[in-house]
Image (spheres, grey):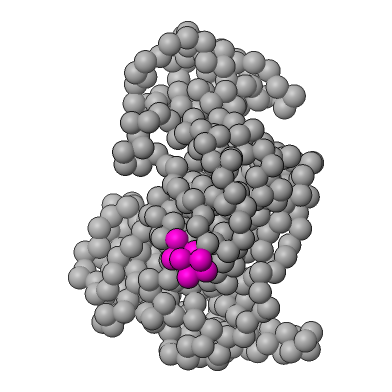
Amino acid sequence: MDILYSADQCGAGKTKWALDLLASEPGRYVLVVDRQLMAETRLKEIQDRAALLGTTPHVEIVSSDGVAKTLGGVGTRIPDAGLRASSKPHVVVIITHAGLTLARRWDAFKLWDAIIIDEAPSLLDREEYAACPFEAGGLSKFYNLAPTEEEGVSRIIHKRGFPEPPERWRKFHQLALTGEAKCDLNSWDDLDHRADAWSAWRLWDVLKLDGVFGEVIFLADAFDQSEAFALMSLSKGVRFQSFRVAAPRVWAPRPVTIRYVSEDRRASTSWFKDERNARDMAKVWDWMALETAPDHLWTSNSGISATADIIGRKVTPRQAGSNEWMSWHRASMIYAARPSPSERRFYTALGIDPAVIETSREGNDMVQFFMRTSLRDPASTAPVVLRCFDRTQAEFIAAKLADGYGLMAALDFDDIGLDLKVRKGGRPPSNGRARMTPEERRVANAAAQQKRRDAKKKAA
């Protein structure tokens, strides 16, 4: 199976390419977006483009939101839409990432021209459970475990009715109903002697689209560094091919400053939410409140409310594809999305480096968020100020801006008096950084950036 993915560095160009194709070229397409709000935006954009071009595509959204809930599950309604629309010469069916993984079958879309998937979807649905021998009897009553070719892994088979499972098992029940769920138990008897947590998961298989569409296309920044790319690469029948939707664009030079408050301790949701760190988190909010510009976009997944009055607009962390804040020059993101120790073991067992998952979840999420600002505009030369929690995050963002857009960011450490004790056995500082002063680190970072710039010019 061949999968095409865009190698362009900015989502704005990919989006324009997709919308122009869908509006101008008669054919049958499925467009997959990350959320319902974006589906509504894309529908209007396609219709507006079509009106200018004089084309008349049939465009509809199939999702699990709104009135559509009364018409049956989205997994059934998606193939139904394919059956209804197959006779139309020019049609675009818009679904969400969730719908992509829930669709019961794809044969209704046989010989459609293309499925275009905007942004990298989440393909793995995984839950962890504390081992409890008292629950083995109840679970075995409703679910069988069948062996697989993977050692220590079983397929979960739903046996009989379970109309209203307890809240603790609701997600597990939903996974089991798909018929594709697995767990890391050989039998329910394993719970009698298992000390650590066990997990159940469902991994969506992209090969379900094989032979259905003329082309399967992914449009996402750094797609080949994503968790989705790594998981799909596990299938031997998948072949990836990159392409460009437009000629590479050149970003105008501009001042970019990335500010951070932790030199060594990495951001983590457990640290953010720990009540013992409430005073430190209050200092972080006060630091963010120092940004007084009204064009300040900010977010956090700390799980607690800001204790300071932060000027600007608070949004959820994932805002891929939005152009709403292209004229804004300030953004802050207190965010962590690294895999847990058990997740690291899980991905290692699959043959995936956990570092790839960390880059995909945390690093690329942060770059996507910061690229909602005027950094998205290649012609803008306005100074930009970004804020994040730790130095590792700041360095990752700076490297992405340098490699993808030719923008050289200055890193500034703001010592706000956080009590950041790093436990022994943690990641050791590299290149002697722990012995550097903030000024020495800024000089070292500038030298590293100049080295990357020189290497880039030499390669060109």
Considering only vertical position in the picture, is 129 above or below 111? above
Residue 445 screen position, x and y as percent: 58, 84
Question: Based on the displayed image, in which of its 4 quarters is residue 260 positioned?
Answer: bottom left
Q: Is residue 241 left or right of residue 430?
A: right
Query: In this view of the protein, can residue 202 be seen by the observer?
Result: no
Residue 397 screen position, x and y as percent: 54, 73
Q: Is residue 49 left or right of residue 28?
A: left
Is residue 131 highlighted in magenta? no
User: Which quarter of the rendering shows the N terminus?
Assistant: top right
Q: Which residue is drawn at the image coordinates 76% and 49% (left, top)?
A: 2
State whether the magenta stretch is mostly helix, strand or loop: helix
Q: Which residue is drawn at the image coordinates 62% and 72% (left, top)?
A: 9
Q: Which residue is drawn at the image coordinates 72% and 25% (left, top)?
A: 151
> Foreground: 23 or 181?
23
> Foreground: 80 or 168?
80
User: Which quarter of the rendering shows the C terminus?
Assistant: bottom right
Q: Which residue is drawn at the image coordinates 51% and 66% (left, top)?
A: 54
Question: Based on the displayed image, in which of its 4 quarters is residue 299 positioned?
Answer: bottom left
Read off the magenta span.
Answer: 47-54
> Foreground: 424 or 73?
73
Q: Is residue 280 left or right of residue 405?
A: left
Considering only vertical position in the picture, is 129 above or below 294? above
> Foreground: 409 or 271?
409
Considering only vertical position in the picture, is 338 above or below 53? above
Residue 201 screen position, x and y as percent: 55, 32
Q: Is residue 63 left or right of residue 449?
A: left
Instruction: In the displayed orientation, state which residue is furthest to the front.
Output: 54
